[in-house]
Amino acid sequence: MAADAFVSLLNEQIAHEYAAHQQYVACAVFYDAETLPQLARFFYAQALEERDHAMMMVQYLVDADEKVLIPGVAAPQVDFKDIVAPVALALQQERRVTEQINALAATARSEGDYTSEQFMQWFIKEQVEEVATMSDLLRVVERSRDDVMEVENYMAREHPGVEGDDPTAPQAAGA
Ligand SMILES: [Fe+2]
Ligand SMILES: [Fe+2]
């Protein structure tokens, strides 16, 4: 059991997480087409993280015996004017998600649903990291927009591979 208001907001959030997945795939494909493999790899990996977020929320609702709506999502933006635009969009998206996650935690608390409030704690921490990563990356791409190989070197150096498993992460459905 979880508070009804929280359940309906979490079902909406599942759509936002899947939309973020689709958007990051679109960013990755844009960089891939520009032959910027490090930026592409980073965004493909970010996309998988967003899918995981959705699946953690699915698992939580399954465990709580609540109805899970697997939503459709709006088409992502696929055309970008330069190599900076996808990162600017990503940062905007992460800031928006941070507000949504905070609203979920606030709803759980005001409904007296402390289990759901606790579930949201991991996502709050995750959003701090994701906003920081994207705002760092935005600074780098803005500074090096005329020297994209500099950005590629930065990605290879600072984001060389998939993050290790986080043992504190909620379980994702199907994992
Ligand atoms: Fe997410
Ligand atoms: Fe994210």
Image: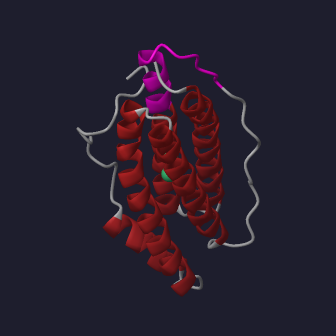
Toward the top, the furthest residue is 65
Q: Name the residue furthest left.
A: 167
Q: Is residue 41 visible?
A: yes
Q: In which quarter of the image is residue 71?
A: top right
Taking the image as shown, residue 46 lies to the left or right of residue 29, namely: left
Q: In which quarter of the image is residue 77?
A: bottom right
Q: Position of residue 150 (x, y in %)?
A: 45, 79
Residue 55 spot, x, y in % from top left: 48, 29
Query: Which residue is nearer to you in this view: 159 or 107?
Result: 107
Seen in the picture, residue 32 relative to 173 is either above or below; the reply is below
Q: Tell me if residue 57 is in the magenta stretch.
A: yes
Q: What residue lies at 59% left-to-right and 85% top-to-bottom?
A: 146
Closer to us: 4 or 30: 4
Residue 37 is covered by the magenta coloring: no
Q: Position of residue 142 (x, y in %)?
A: 56, 82
Q: What stretch is highlighted in magenta?
A: 55-70
